[in-house]
Amino acid sequence: ALERVLGPECGAIGAHAMSNGDHEGGLWKAEDLLQHCANGTNTVTGKTGSRLDFFALSYYERAPGYLESDEWGTNLTGDGAQLELFDGWVKSTRAMLDRNGFSDIPIEVSEGGILFGMDGKWMWHGLAPGGMIDATWTAWVFWKLLENKVDIWSRWPLLRTRGLFKGPEATSTHAMRLIAEMSEDVRGAVDRPEDDRLIRVISGVAPDGNTLRVLAFHHAIDVTKPTQPADLEIDLENLPFEGAVRISKTVLDKDHGDFWPQWEKDRENQRFT
């Protein structure tokens, strides 16, 4: 119908599973939709099959330091917000697309985030729990997207400079600005030694061929216990350029880009409870 009105260049046409990864527990069964697009009768054309350019799902974690429970927003204990279920959900989604003849279309996350704070209160569609977990979880999402070949992850607005939630920027906003600079980069190979800490490194060569970007982060899985800065030694090999180089560094930690430590000091000084 869109093609008939707007022409073949009407834009990408896709579908959202309307589920949080569980394709049986959403508003409909995702596989029924895919089977219809593959083999069902198109209501507009009368022919078999309907165009599908991408397939999307949601991915929300319950709260920092909390993975799974039958009761959302309660019993906030666990191994931390690590996107542990994400790999399996992407794998099952890809298998479902393969079964129905859509092996080549990309998978997207149309919305996602962390739903509840440590106090069990809903954070408006995973807006931001505050603290450094915002930044490290956002970087962890980026790494997971690359590892699982997922093209897009959309979150609800995080900007604090205007609108209803006007105020200081969240650390995740700063992290996303840095990540956005790597969006057109060609990913480089990274050999990471075994380490029990949740430290990851992502590298990319910019389209101009003269810039190498490296994103390194130490994921804080517990919002009440931010991870400490980690000393990293990074060896760069097979660089696509020669000669002298200019190195710049941007740091996000509890003293740079996070308003919560200052808020805690203000609260203590003003005796807020």
Image (cartoon, grey):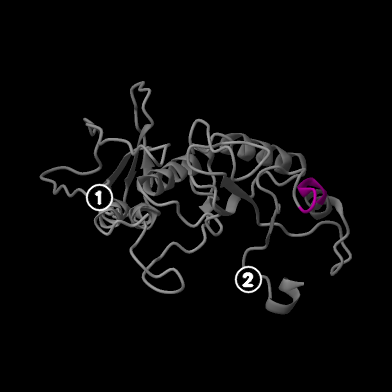
- Residue 215 in the image, given as x and y percentages of width and height: 31, 43
Give the amino acid type for the residue marked by disc 2 in the picture: Glu
Q: Nearer the viewer, mark 1 or mark 2?
A: 1
Q: Which residue is mark 1?
A: 211
Q: Is residue 131 above or below residue 15?
A: above
The residue at the point 53 percent across, 42 percent down is 149
- Write down the quadrant of residue 1 in the picture: bottom right
Q: Is residue 20 magenta?
A: no
- Residue 113 in the image, given as x and y percentages of width and height: 52, 51
Q: Which residue is mark 2?
A: 9
- Residue 138 in the image, given as x and y percentages of width and height: 42, 48
SS type, badge 1: loop
- First in sequence, mark 1 or 2: give its number: 2
Front-most of residues 26 and 68 = 68
Residue 108 vs residue 216: left or right? right
The circle on residue 255 is none
Q: Is residue 248 above or below residue 70?
A: below
Q: Residue furthest top?
A: 194
Give the amino acid type for the residue marked by disc 1 in the picture: Thr
Residue 22 vs residue 265: left or right? right
Q: Residue furthest bottom?
A: 5
Label 1 to label 2, Cα distance in Å?
A: 34 Å
Q: Is residue 24 above or below residue 198?
A: below
SS type, badge 2: loop
Read off the magenta span. Answer: 27-32
Front-most of residues 86 and 191 = 86
